[in-house]
Amino acid sequence: MMNRRVSMIRLSQAQYDALTAKDADALYFTGDTCRIYRGTDCYSLERSPILDPGNGQPGQVLIKTSNGYAWAWASQFQTGYELVLCLPLSTDATAADTGQTITKTGAPVYVYDGILQRACLELDGGSFLTVSPLGLPEGMHSRSLAVWAKSDAPVATNKCIFSYGSQGANKTFGLSLLAENAVGTVGGGGTDFQTLTDAGAVDQTVWNHYCVTNDGIVEKLYVNGVFMTANNLQRDTVASFCRVGTWITGATASNNFVGGIADLRLYNGVLSAEEITTLATP
C-alpha cells in the first residue's frame, strides 16, 4: 500500500505529457484518461474515491487503483463513474433523460421475457439498433459493459451483442458470443477478439449475464457474476454512436446477433465484483 500523504495535481493527459519537470512526491491525475502518475509509476483508476474511515487526515480521500492505494486531498480530486448508457430494450423512442436516440434497422421486436421478468429485444439476424448516446467512455478511460443475452442456437461464428468505436487496434469496444460456446470482447484493427473465455465455458442458448470491465490497463470478463478471465489491454476508443446486435462497422450475415438481449448498461468506470453480482441476479 502507498501510505504517504501527498497532494494531487489534476490536469489533462496532454498537459501531463507536456510537463518537463514533475514533482516526484506528488500524484498527477489526468481527468480525461483517469490515470494516476507518481514518479515513474502509472496507475489507472479502478473505483471512485473511498472516504477515509478515520485513519487519514481530514480532507483526504483514499484512492483505490489497479496497483494499490494512494492518498489525495479531497479538494483536488473529484471523480467517480456514471451510467452513461442504459437500454431497458422495451422501446425505440428517444430517451429524453440521457439524450440518446435509438433507431431500428430491420425488424427488431420488443417482448417480455418471463424468465428474466423484464423486457428484452429479439433480433432475427437481419436487424439491429443504432444508438446515439452522450458521454461514451473515450480514449483509455475506464469502462464497464453489463448485459443479459441468449442466443437462439450455439453460434458457429461470432455474433456481436454490442459495439462502439472505430476501426484500428483496440479502438473498438464491445462483446460477442463466439464459436465453441465461448464469449469474448470485440477487438478491432485485425484482432477480432481480445479477452476470451475458454471453449465450452458458456451455454449460449440460455440467459446469461455478461460483464466486461476495463480500468485502462486490465480488462476483465465475468459471466453470471463469476470472474472468468483477464487480459492486459488498453482501449483507445472514440465516442461514436454504438450498435446493439452487430459490429459498429455495419451489418453482415456473419456477425449479426440472433436471439434476445436485455438490460444493457454501459458505465464510464469499473464496477466492483459485488456490483456485477447484483446486476447478474434476475
Image (cartoon, grey):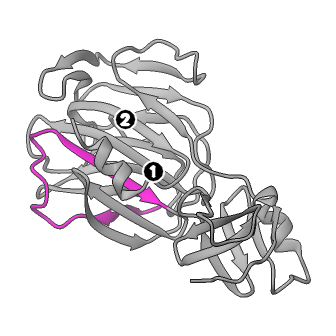
Name which quarter of the figure residue 240 lies in: top right
Q: Is residue 188 visible?
A: no
Quadrant of the image containing the N terminus: bottom right
Q: Residues within 10 Å of mark 2 (few under 14, many from 20)?
A: many
Q: How many marks?
A: 2
Asked if residue 201 lies in the magenta stretch, the reply is: yes
Magenta residues? 189-214
Q: Nearer the viewer, residue 98 or 125?
A: 98
Q: Amino acid at mark 1?
A: Ser
**Which residue ends up furthest to the front in the rendered image?**
54
The reply, left or right, for residue 263 in relation to residue 205 is: right
The residue at 46%/18% (across/down) is 103
The reply, left or right, for residue 227 in relation to residue 20 is: left
Q: Which residue is mark 2?
A: 264
The reply, left or right, for residue 39 in relation to residue 100 is: right
152 above or below 12?
A: above
Q: Amino acid at mark 2?
A: Leu
Q: Which residue is mark 1?
A: 144
The residue at 58%/24% (across/down) is 98
The residue at 75%/86% (across/down) is 39
Q: Is residue 245 visible?
A: yes
